[in-house]
Structures are given as C-alpha cells and as structure tokens.
Image (spheres, rainbow, N blue to C red):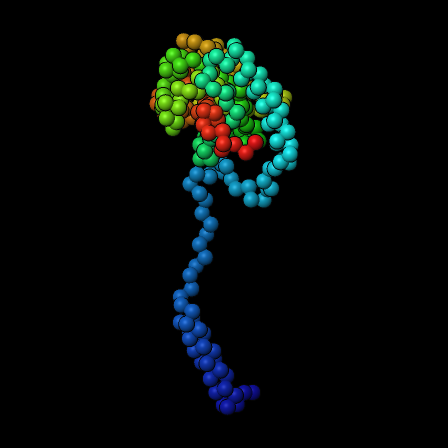
Amino acid sequence: MMTKKSLLLVFVTAIVSVAATIIIRDELGPSTPVAEPTESPKENGICMDYKSEDMSTLNVDLVHTMVDEYKSNQWNFINTNPRFNAKISNDDARAIWFDLETLKQFIYHIEKETKAQDSTITSNNLGVRLYYATYPDQDIMNKFGDLKSTSVRRSDLLNYHNRHTLVMIPTIQKEDGDILDFNPLDKDTYDGTLLTNKKYKFNANDTINSRTSTTILGLTGTPDVRRTGSKNHGMLTPPDAVSTLAF
C-alpha cells in the first residue's frame, strides 16, 4: 500500500513531466503536419518519374563512328550530286533540334488522348516513329499553314526547302506484335488501319474524325479537318550554325 509520501512523489513527478513537455513544445514551436504528397496536375499517370531508371547512354566513339559514316556517305552524296545540290542553298541538314518541352508535350498528348479514347491501352503499347523527310520547294511550302506558324524566323524557314527533316508519327502495337502508325485523335485508326484508310491518302477529300475540334498535336493549333497527330518542325543544322554540333 502506497504511503502519503509515495503518492506525493508520483504526483510531483507527473506535474514535472507535463511541464517539461509544454516547455519543449513551446521552444520548438507548434508541430507542422507532414503534407501528403500531391500528384502533379500534368501527371495523372502519364509521363511519370523515371528516377529509378538509369539514363540511356552510348559510347562516344560509337556516336562519332555512326555520324561520320553518314557524313561520308549519304550526306556527302547529296551535297556532291548536282540533282540534289542545285535545290539547296548550301549543304543538306545534318541534324534537327527540338526543345525539351515540345517533346514532352507531344509524348504527353499521345498517351493522354489515347487513354481518353480507350482506357485499356497502356503506354507499353504506344510509341513514336520518326520518318525521314524533305521540305518541299518554297512555292509548295507556302501553301501549308503548318510551315508559316513556327518558332523559326520566316527568312530562315525559306532556307529549309529541299533539306532533310523528320516527321514524328504516333504508333500503337497490336496483339500480334505489329507496330502501326495511328492518329490518337481518331479512334477509327486504333486498329492500325491508318495505312489503308482512304481518308488518310494524299489529297483525299474525306474528313478525318477528331475527338475535339481543336488541333492538339498539330503545329498551328487551329481547327482543320485534314490533320493527324504528328510533329515536325524543329531547327535544322544547316542552315543553323554547324559550329554548334559536337558530332
């Protein structure tokens, strides 16, 4: 059985502990609740962080070897062949540049628009095919609004005619493993029939379906019934300064 002296000791100890806790809390300031991690508005499961993956790398000598092979063969042939050389003001383009945000937006919209049309499609089924292409003659370039509204100065753009470029087209992989071009804005192409669909043929008069009336993946951002998810315009070198190239 506890004596009065023991009870008094327990009571005093409790009071001291409470007081000490209050003093420490006041010294440190009020506790701040830990904020729950919030999802970036642009993520929503799309283009997520890859911090657990290593960055893709190539041996520098391999890059030099491959680029030098191209310059010594295909690029040199174009520049020395009168049939091609007469059409360009200088050497053919050796490289094309896109800013990072442009690439991120393009990839984001491929996945976002596809999942909006069919939620069963995953990013593992999607990709981008890069077509080698050539800018047409100036008179033909002037007919396309896509080549009038770019970040490149108009005077520089006129020097792009007949030079190499790239056109990026979204792809979808089917169950049989085939990787096919498709238009994320047109569900009619999700079965891979874009390559046989007559409305995607050159100079076709058919209207191309779109989930939205606004061009999301196009270059100008204006409504157009003859548009497909794609990306082209980057900066060519040359005519941009060749001195900026490392390879």
Q: Is residue 49 above or below residue 144?
A: below
Relative depth, front residue between 220 and 136: 136
Quadrant that contains the N terminus: bottom right
How many labels sit on residues?
0
Instruction: Please say whether residue 174 is visible from this viewpoint.
Output: no
Quadrant that contains the C terminus: top right
Q: Identify the residue at image location x=50%, y=90%.
A: 5
Image quarter of residue 73: top right
Residue 117 place in picture, x, y as percent: 46, 26
Lateral position of residue 171 relative to residue 221, left or right: right
Residue 92 place in picture, x, y as percent: 50, 20
Residue 125 place in picture, x, y as percent: 57, 28
Relative depth, front residue between 234 and 63: 63
Q: Is residue 60 above or below residue 160?
A: below
Relative depth, front residue between 108 and 113: 108
Q: Identify the residue at image location x=52%, y=90%.
A: 3
Q: Identify the residue at image location x=46%, y=16%.
A: 88
Relative depth, front residue between 198 and 53: 53
Q: Identify the residue at image location x=50%, y=14%.
A: 85
Instruction: Please say whether residue 64 is visible from this viewpoint.
Output: yes
Residue 78 place in picture, x, y as percent: 55, 16
Image quarter of residue 28: bottom left
